[in-house]
Amino acid sequence: MEPIFDSAANALVANEAELTLCDRESIHLPGAIQPHCVLLALDPEDLRIIHAGGDTQGLLAASPQSLLGENASRLFSQDQVERLRTLANEPCTHRAVHPFSIASGAEGSATSDVIAYRSSGLLLIELDPRREQSPSNPLEIIQTALRNIQQADTSLAICQSVVDEVRRIVGFDRIMFYRFLADGSGAVIAEATASNIDSFLGLHFPESDIPKQARELYRTNPIRAIPDARYAPAPILSLPDAPSASTLDLSHSAIRSVSPIHRQYLANMGVVASMSMSIVIRGRLWGLVACHHANPRYLPYNLREAFALLAQMVSSQLEARASAESFEVQKHSAKVHEELLNRMSEEPELAAGLVRFRPNLRDLI
């Protein structure tokens, strides 16, 4: 996830100038990825590899440098290459899709999910190795969670049910529901933690804790995971005549390297693995479900996608509940307003009609 910070941790590593720099950091153009995965950027015309980075040696038995200029057919079967060619020719492939999985690692002993999307005029391919066992039916897990969440009868109860269900599924040390307030700041309004974890419930965080560009990426990407924040970024290499990898837009990447400032903040909080789910209502980032863990966690791709679906369903449920609650508030206000008018008409003094009985002016406000 991109920055949700403990204010005490902030003071250790950032001053006002650094926070301003963080707000200007081009986090979607890191020029590097998380080292447990692989990124390949292909020319959509001929599927030639223009950029390569990550653990290509471990997953593809080839160095990144040796892959530059090669065709995708060196790495993928004919059917898989045809699928990639179809994706490269589709007009709108900016959202990541999962066209297939491949055998990877030593002698094909492991499996990697292949994720593809268009960016910067190229077809980007990501290989995400499966390190944790994937649930047999992640959608069934999410359906069960949704049934439990739907029993909540208020917005706050929904938020609490969400963090309870997410922790039940993944077992992270801390799950927080982080709500954005009208002034841009945030507050932890619901939380589920392990018994030995300090609570953040009720804490407020300044707007600068999550820079504007990070909020925009949260808004466009419903799920974000960092399996091990202690990593050293893996640089993306480029053909000599190609644009620099630092111009490669990784806004939709699941494996882009995150800000070093953010990784330091996580370290200060004792967080190794993190995941976030974006709650978007009417096109605006309403909140985040932030998950923290003290040990590495490599959640499989299909489970992360199931959580992305859960985030979208929770967003819809919260929008409906907030609308219903707003309507009830409006009805209550109208009733109080009407009673105040009646009281005022019966009292000889205006002030007495506003405050003497209940409901009164304070109830209206």
Image (tube, grey):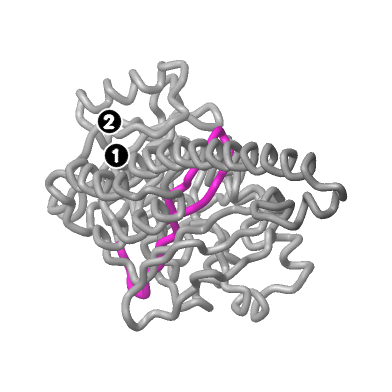
Q: Secondary structure at mark 2?
A: strand
Is 180 above or below relative to 192?
Answer: above
In the image, the segment drawn in magenta is: 276-297
Residue displayed at 61% across by 59% down: 186
Is 114 above or below relative to 27?
Answer: above
Q: Are marks 2 and 1 in contact (CB under 8 Å)?
A: yes
For residue 127, side relative to residue 157 (left or right): left
**Given the image, on which type of amino acid does mark 1 rest?**
Val
Provide the major secondary structure of the magenta segment.
strand
The one of 8 and 242 positioned closer to us in this rendering: 8
- The 10 Å Cα crowd at callout 2, few under 14, some 14 to 19, many 20 or more, is few
Residue displayed at 48% across by 37% down: 324
Per the model, the C-alpha gap separating discs 2 and 1 is 7 Å
For residue 219, side relative to residue 359 (left or right): left
Q: Earlier in the sequence, mark 2 or mark 1?
A: 2
Q: Which residue is mark 1?
A: 114
On whether residue 126 falls in the magenta region, the answer is: no
The furthest residue to the right: 349
